Image: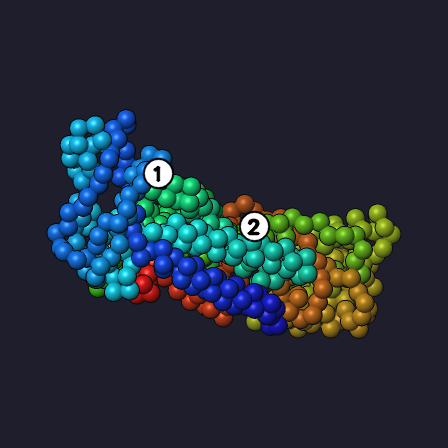
Amino acid sequence: MKRNHSFSIIIIIAVIISAVFLAVVVRIIHPMARTLDIAVPSQGSIEYSDFYIECTEDNIVKMTAYKKSGEYYLIRLEGISSGETDVAINAVHAEDHSISDAFWSSVTKTKSGILYTSNTLNFNGYQYLFIAVTIVFTVFAILMLIHFILSKRKRYFSYETILSLGLFMYFSLQSMALLPFAIESVIDPHKRNGIVMFLCTGYVLSVIALFSTPFLLIFSVFISSSNIKLIKKEGKSFTNLLGFVISFMLLGGLILIILLIKGSTPSLDIAVGSTAKMITRNIVASLFVYFECNLLATFILCQIAGRHKPKLDKDHIIILGCGIRDDGTLFPLLRGRADAAIAFYKKQLAETGKAAIFVPSGGQGPDECMPEGEAIKRYLLEQGIPEDHILPETRSDNTYQNMKYSKAIIDKDNPDSKMIFATTNYHVYRSGILAASVGMNADGVGAKTKWYFWPNALIREFIGMVVNGRKIHIALCILLVAQSIILGNLQWLLQIIF
């Protein structure tokens, strides 16, 4: 299938720009982080006239200045040599010159001169890195939204449209989750500290997954109920069990994320066990949220496409086959497609006077008495459609061939034809993608189906789209997993850089 490379180019450009942007921000923060401002809260009306520090290790840090800033006294430390020391900050009361313990912290100076508090993972400038990460997510979300709008206008039926909508959701959720904390860190950097940033960036995807639990529970109950009804009506088969499979995978993924979160805390000390746990959690969470967003995007676009009302100006109407009875009559599903096509035909004829040509499409399966295209033609004749308005296609074995062989027939009849295809509502979107892949600029009309049928059918459509677009999904998953691992272990990366 032909693919639009603009999507891949946008992703590559966005990754490069964001990497450069974050690298620049880190380099700007580096000089700031050579000093460390420890915020000591002021105690109501109590005033302090001086501060001094006591360290468990000599020649690691020294106090160089202090100042009052709003509700805090900011005690500035500078590094002397690399190492770690416990620092006790003592405050001298202005009234009676008595001394009290104001603050205690463990402070580390790296070899590159960076100072941070070991217990709160705080360093000067953390808020700018926090807002920079949030900006990157926001920019990614905006780029995906722009691509979705442009893709939707240019070619509504495409994998890129689904992907761009799914990724817009993926990045928007992260941006919205981080934004309040990022803004607060800039407005009042001393109210929070570095550990808030590491917790937010490291756990954002896991938290998003957990917040979707109510939706997933409702979804799982609904789709499982529809599967039970479907099995009662049509019997057991693997495809009729897909709803149970997806529900199990979604709920299993949530349980796994919860287990991986339990007891997991950010630390600058690299330990094999905790590192593996964090990486595993971030990989599971990123893949879970990615496919959750794409599943939702698929459902949204399939629902919109299935309810779309095409313009009444068509020259040909393709009816996609999907199996016939032993006697050659149509199953209800296929009859629904034919009826939807007839309804469109009659409405167009009544309102515009233009009679379209039917192209019933479908070959003969090994257990079928005739080609599906011929069976649909018989049904059309029974419904009063003139025979000279029917051009059956009887060679195809699947939807792709339906489109390919039908297009060949239509091109012979009218190379400039305006086409439409009729299928079941859940199948409109993927059929449109396949139509576009053979060079057909066709609209779609969807036939209604039973409530218990479409959830399972939509899952089949989602799986089909994932399989057909597997190369770009694999590439995106690698990028998103790498992103989540880096942000989930940002403190270690900063330790290496600094």
Q: Do callouts 2 and 1 mark residues in contact (Cβ within 8 Å)?
A: no
> Judging from the image, what secondary structure is the residue with disc 2 in?
helix
- Left or right for 435, reference 172: right
Q: Amino acid at mark 2?
A: Ile
Q: How many marks?
A: 2
Quarter residue 271 falls in: bottom left
Tell me where residue 209 appears, x and y as whole percent: 39, 49
- Dot 1 surroundings within 10 Å: few (below 14), some, or many (20 or more)? few
Residue at (15% x, 50% y) in the render: 55
Tell me where residue 481 appears, x and y as whole percent: 39, 63
Q: Is residue 280 visible?
A: no
Which is nearer the N-term, disc 2 or disc 1? 1
Q: In the displayed structure, would residue 147 be above or below residue 72? A: below
Q: Nearer the viewer, residue 392 or 160?
A: 160
Separation (CA) of disc 2 from disc 1:
50 Å
Residue at (28% x, 36% y) in the render: 41
- Dot 2 surroundings within 10 Å: few (below 14), some, or many (20 or more)? some
**Image quadrant occupied by the N terminus:** bottom right
Tell me where residue 58 appears, x and y as whole percent: 14, 56
Q: Nearer the viewer, residue 293 or 340?
A: 293
Q: Which residue is mark 1?
A: 69
Residue at (13% x, 55% y) in the render: 57
**Image quadrant occupied by the C terminus:** bottom left
Tell me where residue 101 appears, x and y as whole percent: 17, 38
Label 2 or label 1, whichever lies nearer to me, is: 1
Quarter residue 415 falls in: bottom right
Residue at (58% x, 62% y) in the render: 160
Quarter residue 67 falls in: top left
Q: Residue lying furthest left in this view?
A: 56
Q: Nearer the viewer, residue 291 or 415?
A: 291
Q: Which residue is mark 2?
A: 300
Q: Amino acid at mark 1?
A: Ser
